Amino acid sequence: MKLKFPVKKVLLGTAMLVAVGTVVAQASGLTRTLVARNDVSFAPNREAVVVRVDVAANAAVGRHTHPGDEVAYVMEGQLQLTVEGQAPRLVKAGESFTVPAGVPHDAHNDGAGTAKLVGVYLVEKGKPLVAPAPAPAAAN
């Protein structure tokens, strides 16, 4: 019996995982692990990217943006979340948050253990998942 093995699909999938690992900048104490990447039905140029995010104790994610909305759920730990235009807030295990496309944000883990999240990004295809954002302008 001859087995059919989708070599092209496996190679393409592997290349995508490598590309995501290369494109997604990792701050010290931050790990993003790709879980899934799928097309969405509402827009041909968008995809849903599911990522596990681990933020070590006393680590900051770093100010950044995404080319689409981020919806995240905190599985363990807590983070101090700063979203431009909003008051900083503490998000704890069992809570979620949403960050609109292109809005600079940051998170810091002040806790003693690793904060663990699942992030779902509804983003434009072909764009880096994460882009660094400049520091906010000083208030006058």
Image (spheres, rainbow, N blue to C red):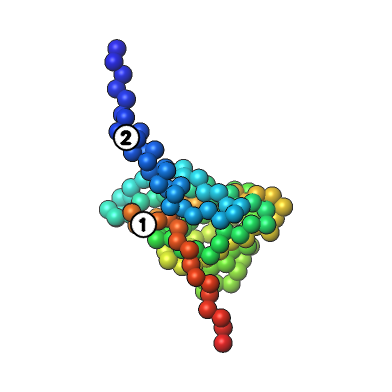
Under mark 1, the amino acid is Lys
Residue farthest toward the right in the current orientation of the protein: 112
In which quadrant of the rendered image does the C terminus lie?
Answer: bottom right
Label 2: state its secondary structure: helix
Q: Which residue is mark 2?
A: 9
Residue 11: x %, y % from top left? 34, 35
State the image quarter where residue 87 is shown.
bottom right
Residue 53: where, in percent of width, then height? 54, 50
Q: CA distance from mark 2 to mark 1?
A: 21 Å
- Whether pointer 2 and pointer 1 mark residues with C-beta atoms closer than 8 Å, the reply is no
Q: Which of these two is toward me, 140 or 52?
A: 140
47 sits to left or right of 30: left
**Is any atom of residue 66 visible in this view?**
yes
Q: Which mark is residue 113?
A: none
Tell me what residue is drawn at x 27 percent, y 53 percent: 44
Task: Mark 2: give few (<14), some (14-19) or many (20+) Cα within 10 Å.
Answer: few
Residue at figure coordinates x 30%, y 33% from the top left: 8
User: At label 2, which amino acid type do we have?
Assistant: Lys
Instruction: Name the image quarter holding the N terminus.
Output: top left
The residue tagged with tag 1: helix, strand or loop?
loop
Residue drawn where x is 33% and y is 38% of the image: 12
Residue 43 picture location, percent across and down:
29, 55
**Residue extending furthest bottom?**
140
Q: Residues within 10 Å of mark 1 (few under 14, many from 20)?
A: few
The residue identified by callout 1 is 127
Placement of 102 over or under 5, stated as above or below: below
Residue 27 or residue 106, whichever sits in front: 27
